[in-house]
Image (tube, rainbow, N blue to C red):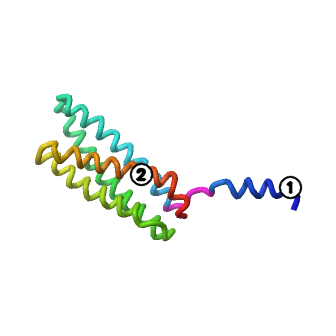
Amino acid sequence: MSSSTTSTATRSSRRAAAPSGPLRLLQVTTALSVLVLLAQFVTAGQLLSGNGGIEDVHGGGAIAMHVVQGLVLGSAFLLQRATRGPLWPTALAALSFVVGFAQAWTGSHSGMAVHVPGAIITSVVTVWVAAWAFSGARRAE
């Protein structure tokens, strides 16, 4: 084999393959969940600043977050089944999904002492799964 053939083969093997369907789905849903999360932070900040008129928008964002987190959970499960990869991303997505419902309930029924820590848990887990989907998940394929 000539050096040019070896060089070309090495370069092609270094290129990452395009993400599979289940991985791309997880990437899209986690990106959406981060965007909805950011919108929730903005509306929460406005609520804390005394803008009560934004409460319906924040509540609608909570519904959007539940829908998107459900999609993240489903896509994490599909990726795990397709690749036999690690189970922890699916477990974290399930945790975020469940905590999100409890966290949303406390926002409308109790004080911020429970609502805010729930938001922090949801935020950390959401970003963690999204970061894995865009970096470590390829190694699982």
In primary-sequence order, the first of circles 2 and 1 is 1
Residue type at numbered disc 1: Ser
* Point 50% across, 58% down: residue: 137
Query: Magenta residues: mostly which secondary structure?
Result: loop
Q: Residue 126: horizontal and vertical position, in percent? A: 36, 51
Label drawn at residue 106: none
| Residue 62 position in % (x across, y down) | 26, 47
Displayed quadrant of residue 86? bottom left
Q: Nearer the viewer, residue 84 or 73?
A: 84
What residue does disc 2 label? 30
Taking 59 as reference, is 131 left or right? Answer: right
Looking at the image, which residue is at 19% across and 38% down? 55
Quarter in which the C terminus is drawn: bottom right
Residue annotated with mark 1:
3
Q: Amino acid at mark 2?
A: Thr
Is residue 18 within the magenta segment? yes
Q: Secondary structure at mark 1?
A: helix
Q: For mark 1, does the 10 Å Cα neighbourhood hold few (<14), some (14 to 19), or many (20 or more) residues?
A: few
Question: Which stretch is magenta?
Answer: 17-22
Q: Residue at x 28, y 46 (%)?
A: 120
